[in-house]
Amino acid sequence: MFQTQIHHSHTARTFFLLNKPCIPSTGTASFSIRPRTEFRKKYRNVRVGYAPSIIKAVATDSQTSVAVKATVTVKLTVSGFLSSLVGLSHGLDDVADLLGKSLFLEVVSSELDPKTGLEKKPIGAYAHRTTEKNGEVTYESDFVIPDDFGEIGAVLVENEHHKEMFLKNIVLHGLPNGSLEFNCDSWVASKFDDSQKRVFFTNKSYLPTQTPSGLKEIREKELATLRGNGQGERKSYERIYDYDVYNDLGEPDSSPDDARPVLGGSKQYPYPRRCRTGRPMCKKDPKSETRSLTVYVPRDEAFSEVKELTFSKNTLYSALHAVLPAIETIITDTTQGFPLFTDIDQLYDQGIKVPNLKKHDFLKDALPRIVRAITNSVDDALQFETPSLIVRDKFSWFRDEEFSRQTLAGLNPYSIKSVTEWPLKSTLDPKIYGPPESAITKELIEKEIKGFMTFEEALKQKKLFIIDYHDIFLPYVIKVRQIKGTTLYGSRAIFFLSPDNTLKPLAVELVRPPMDGKPQWKQVFSPSWEATASWLWKLAKTHFLAHDSGYHQLVSHWLRTHCCTEPYIIASNRQLSAIHPIYRLLQPHFRYTMEINALAREALINANGIIESAFSPGKYSIEMSSVAYGLQWRFDTESLPADLISRGLAVEDPNSPHGLKLTIPDYPFANDGLLLWDSIKEWVTDYVKYYYKDASIVESDAELQAWWTEIRTKGHGDKKDEPWWPALKTPEDLIEIVSTIVWVTSGHHAAVNFGQYAYAGYFPSRPTIARINMPNEDPTDDGWRRFLTKPENELLACLPSQLQATKVLTILDVLSSHSPDEEYLGEYIEPAWNADPIIKAAFERFAGRLKELEGIIDARNEDKTLKNRHGAGVVPYELLKPFSESGVTGKGVPYSISI
């Protein structure tokens, strides 16, 4: 592609010994590598130092030139360069360092050669190692750049080592206009694995039509590299982005029971696409891909070393491969429930002695909130933190007020809708599922709201609200009931908005379709003062909450954030150059999402994984999310304002804050979320309008149009013909599309993820699964008598088993946690944004608004009139507070979906 000019100027090489600790090696020479403190390792050795040869790159023509020094910063990493310090490759790489040939750099001109009309020949030089400090190694090279070389637009890098390196940045010193920085933050594969040189552009962004002539070809070739050819199995060092269906969740070669349907690519199971790995197909099902111990993601999508050590390799790995198996050794009866509520309390007060944990010393560091040392004992204990919900009010989970409040200020604020039509009616086939009419009648509603208003007034004034899982769950009831130790219903819950803006629960309806020769069974349960009806109401709430937990995890959380975002990431890397301004705007919102999704496919949403074993609806969980995607997901309602309007929770009103009038004025998620949405949209507006002055620039941007087309037709290809996809013709269109993506990856995900332990950590408050039927569904005399004698036992038997509960609590603790290197929205500025004064100023305004939001949320939580977020025993709503410390905090909005 390029011909390189190189000139070597040699000096004598001097070797000397340094009395400094360094890593042992079998080679003849080794160099000091001081790992970062988070590695928690110590190494000792003698370091060999040297005076490197001087390697300079000069122009061959006699002309005026400038001497430029390149400084390359490489981070020491466990999996890459640091790991190469042992074994055969270490010795070979030492030789490269000694020869001053660790990296080969080429500077690329932004201009074409006026004589030939072709790219100017890049000027190349080897970089030699100079210093190592604070976990970073510095390399330097010298160039002599002719005056007519033009502005430098890119640097090509070739890694001469046998192991990959993590390049932090490259800085060119001595240029007439000052230093020029290339922000890399990228893995560079060894040339022995990948012979293609890596390209790094300057921090200046360019639309395709504005690309300097000398960079156009290299811009296009880099995109072609990232797209790949769709062939072969991907290698761990590759950076190829391509699409595939979800055909790797099951293991049909292992057992027919472990087979799972392919999600995506069919009308029956529509689904977003994932990243292609190219693994071989299964023998027994050629449509399913084989599974492996590790799942390919493009190399730069992997976790940072800090996040990897604190989360993927320590925390989640520890939970999945040490803690959960240890639990299974002491809870051998997978169906055993909790005999008493005091037994549940012991999980938090005393913990469970787990002998097998003692041999895993690292667990107390990896999972300090869960694994506790027992004084004077050879064992360790699995002990859970008491969630703040229970610390404030131990019996909050039992109260109807909390049941209702959490629909607006809890873990799943996305399901509640306004009742707009009456009577309530199913859309399912009545020949299969029975009569479609709901058993919740006008008369029942009027009985419950008597003294407030009539039914007609409540419906007209939008005072009735519903969470409806009837049609999404009912088709799975017969299948799920065939799984031992679990049950399912179609369900609905209806609420009334009282004058103090709190919700009053009116009824829960549970429905079983015709099965086993029995007709459809449906029953409505309401709050009651009478003992039997009161206990049936509590049990009905338990069933409904299990459905809500499953829907939250599978749809509100996994599907709408993790799963639907992956196609945006793939399309952005395939169609938007790294110097495209929209790529640089979105890139921080995509960090680590593909990696966490791969981990989910590996151990959470796979066949017999945590979700299937402990959440409704069991082995059909991810299949059900496919049905929800087909029936419910629309890009044009994923922004917060559009979502609220679509659910009847807001109407457009130019005279109201945010241009919306909320149907429920005290709706903490919506109130805080709209402030965050406005801040995001203002920032995106400032950014987009800086680069796109009018519609013609949007329409003529080939990369941008290809990006949006690919998201619609490939990434979400099963919905490519839907009429609701937004057009992309104007800056306003682009602002809405980008703001929606940013919201989903930040605000939406934070609202449904980081409160998981706070709200569901005491599992009776949000059980993830219900194990037995309602006692009044086809009751036997003995069964009904047991219920009447001790209804508490019926509730305990319905709750998750001991094994299910401890598994879920372990995972929720991990998933609710912020990494020590979490990147919060508006906290740090990206180098490319910082490079432009206009964009930098816009970001500073954005960051300022987020700091103001912190104070506004604090003030709201102290407002006595806002009863859904303030009151005796009430947990303040903080899930959309932008910033947080590390750990499980129940607040903080990261840029991206990284857990």
Image (cartoon, helix red, strand yellow):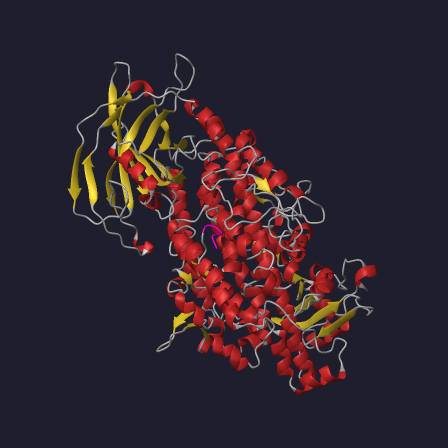
Residue 898 on the magenta segment: yes
Tell me if 815 is positioned left or right of 646 in this view: left
In this view, the residue in front, 133 or 566, is 133
Give the image quarter of residue 496.
Answer: bottom right
In this view, the residue in front, 110 or 627, is 627
Res. 387 in view: yes
Q: Residue at x 32, y 20 (%)?
A: 5
Report the quarter where the N terminus lies.
top left
Up the image or down, 883 lies above or below 544; here it is above
Tell me if 604 is positioned left or right of 48 in this view: right
State the image coordinates of residue 118 (x, y, percent, origin top left): 43, 17
Tell me if 534 is positioned left or right of 874 in this view: right
Residue 368 on the magenta segment: no
State the image coordinates of residue 256 (x, y, percent, origin top left): 67, 55
Q: Residue furthest top?
A: 115
Give the image quarter of residue 202.
Answer: top left
Res. 368 in view: no
Q: Which segment is the magenta one?
A: 895-899
State the image coordinates of residue 776 (x, y, percent, origin top left): 73, 78
